[in-house]
Every structure is written in C-alpha cells, then in structure tokens.
Amino acid sequence: MGGGAFRAWPDPSVAVPGGAWPLLPGAGGQQRGAARRPGGYLRPRRLGFHVARWTGDAGHCAGGAGDVEYEVRVDRVQRPSSPGGRVVLTTSRGQRVAAAVVMAVPASAAKEMLVDPKADEAAVLAAPYSCGLLAGLALAEPLADDELGGAYGVLVAPDSSSPLAAIAVYSRADTTRTSTGEVLTIMFRQDAARRLAAADHATVRDAAVAAVAPLLPGLADRVVDSRVTRWQEAMPYVPVGHAAAVRNYRTRLPAGSPVLLAGDYLGFPWSDSAAFNGLWAADRLIADHAGPAGVPSSEVASDAERR
C-alpha cells in the first residue's frame, strides 16, 4: 500500500505507479476525480497499476484537478538523464512523463521496472518475501462448541510436523452473524506453501483437509466447498540489517530525487507501516517538488484514510 492522494501544485506533475490502488476490474479507460476502491491484484509484469498525474495549480485529485488512469501496466521507469529532466514511464498505453514518481509496489515489481537502481535502492529492494497459501473450507454446519477447544484461532507450533501454520474459525470471529454453515481458513507454513505453490486446487484442498483431520475427525465428509488463495509475495521478511538499509535509503536520498520508493519492504509487514510509507513519500515529494507555494503535508490524504 502506498501514497494515497496528493494535493496538486503547479507544474511539475507527479506520477504514482503503484499498489496503493490496484487493478480495478471493469474500470477501463481514464477516470477523473476521486479514486475508486481496489478490486484486485495481479502479479509483476502484468500488475495493474494506476498512474495518477496532478497538473492543476489548485484543488486536488478528488476535486478533479488530476487524472487517474486505471488498468495501465507500467513496464519501465527511467530517471532523467540530466538535472531538471523528466522521469519517463513506459506503459501499456504508451509513454508517460513526470517530474517525480512514487513506486508503491512489491520489491520484485520495482526491480523489474526501475532502470539502474542506485546502491541504497538495491539494498532495500533485496528484502526477501514469504509466500502465502490459504485454503478456505466451507462446512454445512458450524463447529460444535467443544471442537478445536472452542477457540477462534489455532496456532501450530513451529516445530510440529504439521504442514499448517494456523486455523481460523469464521463463526467464532463474528458472533452476530445470522447465516448457517462454517468456514475454516487454513494457513500453510512456509515450506508447505512453497511445495504446494504450483499444485492445483484439489491437491491443496485435500492437503488442508488431511492436515486438519487429526484435530477434526471426519472433516472430509463435512466439507461442501472450498477456495484456495495464493500470494507469491505475501509479506516481506525483515532480516537483521534491513532496518539500517532502510535508514540509509531515506537519510541519503538526494534532495529533489525524481524516484521515491514506498513499497512494503520499507517497514514491518502490516497496514500501519504501509500507511507510514505512503505518508513519508508524500511528505518528501511535497518538500522536494512543491516549493514555497506547496501544499502542507497535513493536507495529504493517505490511502489508509481513504478506505
């Protein structure tokens, strides 16, 4: 999650290819005004980016002063060859130019797009990611009160031989619900998630049922439907030394830098860090490019505030 909506200032324009507002199915063409809510997410090289450009001298995106293009794939981000030049974006709809670009995407997508990353950029973009594999198992009836100890969630010990990391019980998360039935969300641990990453739906479902069966005997006969969700890059790891790399990137970033990184690898893997990354990029962008007549950072709406 990245930078949200920046207020506009006189030229230069600003482009934000990013994960702040992912691909919106059916939202083809150029949209003006307030950004619509996210609707989906595809992988790098086919990732649906929005490109937002603000060129008005007053007002902001929600007031119609900027253009937001949806379903635009950004393939390349090229820095200007000389001071004061423009960043060139190669996209699925032709070239776009801007004075500055905020890249709010996962590390692998940023590395594919950004031409000749600087040393400090490369250091933060080297963050490894965990993958994610979840199986949702629908049951016709809720679990009995004593099943799984009546718990909403079960965490599996890391040293267990089980391929599971956790189990969540939907009916115990929302006690006000009126619908019948049950959904068990089964999360696989990393080694199992990577082993099953390319497996088909039935194989993942069967693996989930088999892993939970010792805790819920007869589960296979109770499953009436299932869904499988996969993330190649679920969350970034924060290895020892990564915080220093992030500090170096932010403190040594030259004033007026035409490229700002705002991906999830710049903080801990949670929504508050993502919001902070976007606000940091917004504040830096305004400080570097708005000039004396720029808009105060207090008027910048983060993506988290828009939801």
Image (cartoon, helix red, strand yellow):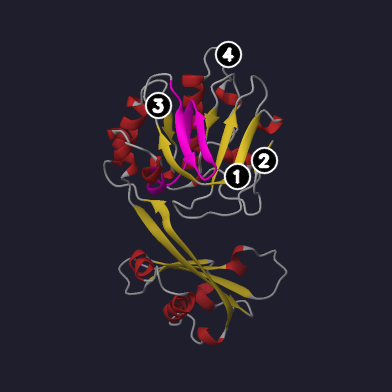
Q: CA distance from mark 3 to mark 1?
A: 25 Å
Which label's residue is closer to the chain start, 3 or 1? 1
User: Badge 3: few (under 14), some or many (20 or more) residues near its Cα, within 10 Å?
Assistant: some
Give the quarter of the figure containing the C terminus: top right
Q: Would you say residue 122 is visible in this rendering?
A: yes
**Circle 3/circle 2 CB separation < 8 Å:** no
Q: CA distance from mark 4 to mark 1?
A: 30 Å
Q: Residue 175's quadrant in the figure?
A: bottom right
Which label's residue is closer to the chain start, 4 or 2? 2
Q: Which residue position is annotated with label 2?
A: 31
- Foreground: disc 4 or disc 1: 1
- Identified at 61% across, 51% down, the residue is 24
**Circle 3/circle 4 CB separation < 8 Å:** no
Q: CA distance from mark 2 to mark 1?
A: 7 Å
Say the numbered circle drawn on residue 293: 4
**Circle 2/circle 1 CB separation < 8 Å:** yes
- Foreground: disc 3 or disc 2: 3
Q: Which residues are magenta?
A: 85-110
Q: Which residue position is annotated with label 1?
A: 70
- The amino acid beneath tag 3 is Pro
Q: CA distance from mark 4 to mark 2?
A: 27 Å
* Looking at the image, residue 280 lies above or below residue 182: above
Which percent across, then down, holds residue 94?
A: 52, 40
- Identified at 38% across, 46% down, the residue is 112
Q: Which residue position is annotated with label 3?
A: 80
**Circle 3/circle 1 CB separation < 8 Å:** no
- Residue 164 versus residue 107: which sits nearer the camera? 107
